[in-house]
Image (cartoon, grey):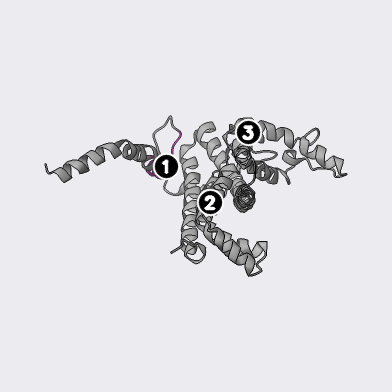
Amino acid sequence: MSHSKKRAWIGVLFALPAILGLVILKIYPIIASGFYSLTEYHITDSPEWVGFENYKNLFSDPLFIKSFSNTMYYLVLLVPLGLVVGICLALLLVKDIKGISFFRSMVYLPSIVPVYAFATVALWFFNPYFGLVNGLLARVGINGPLWIADESWVKFTLVLAAQWGAGPTALLFMASMKDIPRELYEAATLDGANAWQKFWRITFPFISPVTLYYLITSSIQALQFFDMPNIMTGGGPNNASLSLGMYIYRNAFRYTNMGYASAMSWIIFIIALILSFVLFRTSMKWVFYGE
């Protein structure tokens, strides 16, 4: 065996654990769920081929339609709101002031708190009767809503609560902003540019690659929104906060209807694929990679 082939085999050997993990934990489940989505499968029985029957049944299932519309609501609000919060925090954290390392740590700290612990705190924040938020609103003469106990407010409450984990996004944008040459801002100041013009003409183009990354990953996460609504509301009241991820979980592990759950998983997968494709295709017009 030649020296170059030997080196290649050694490389493959080192990469083998990662390749096996990818095949066993990622590729195989995707292929298997695609097969099960075309079957009637209840774990204890052998899969029975039904073709596209599961997909047809989805569109006559009121709970699927409800959970689908709720998930679209989460997607439309969570992603842009998270972007605004992340960029605003990054603009504050990028400043070179005394003790900034402490504030950066404090912004990141909530993201390492287990979601169950945070959800418990958020339940107290948004408690309609003795919660912190309604207590503060009452001080300025505003009667706060019922938040998670109100069908019309529960999804918005979950979106607000989810911003608690904006720290990693903020640090990502901050790292990108620190690479922007200071001379550009100095030149813009001499030309009389205001703060918004500096952000839109200088800052945003430089952080656009990170923005693209954020939009893709956060859209996928929003489509899989599960932890917060499952812990805080269990999908209630009256399924007003039920997400597709929760409905898949119910069908897969509560009703053991794996075929039906796999069909819903593929709906999420296809939407995520289309969104990612659109973002990548349009990114050529608004993402700046430098020279």
Q: Which residue is identified by label 2?
A: 214
Is 117 rendered above or below residue 98? above
Is disc 3 placed on a helix, strand or loop? helix
Q: Identify the amino acid type marked 1.
A: Ser
| Image mark for residue 88 | none
Q: Position of residue 56 (x, y in %)?
A: 50, 50
Query: As shown in the figure, which amino acid type bears the numbered disc 3?
Result: Ile
| Of the pair 219 and 53, the residue shown nearer to us | 219
Seen in the picture, residue 58 relative to 41 is either above or below; the reply is: below
Q: CA distance from mark 2 to mark 1?
A: 27 Å
The answer, for residue 59, to whether it is visible in the render is: no
Tell me the crowding category of disc 1: few under 14, some 14 to 19, or many 20 or more residues within 10 angstroms, Cα based. Answer: many
**Which residue is the site of mark 3?**
231
Rendering quarter of residue 250: top right
Say which of marks 2 and 3 sits in front: 2
What residue span does the magenta drawing correspond to? Answer: 29-42
**Relative image position of residue 140 (x, y in whole percent):** 86, 44
State the residue lying farthest toward the bottom: 191
Name the residue beneath numbered marker 1. Answer: 33
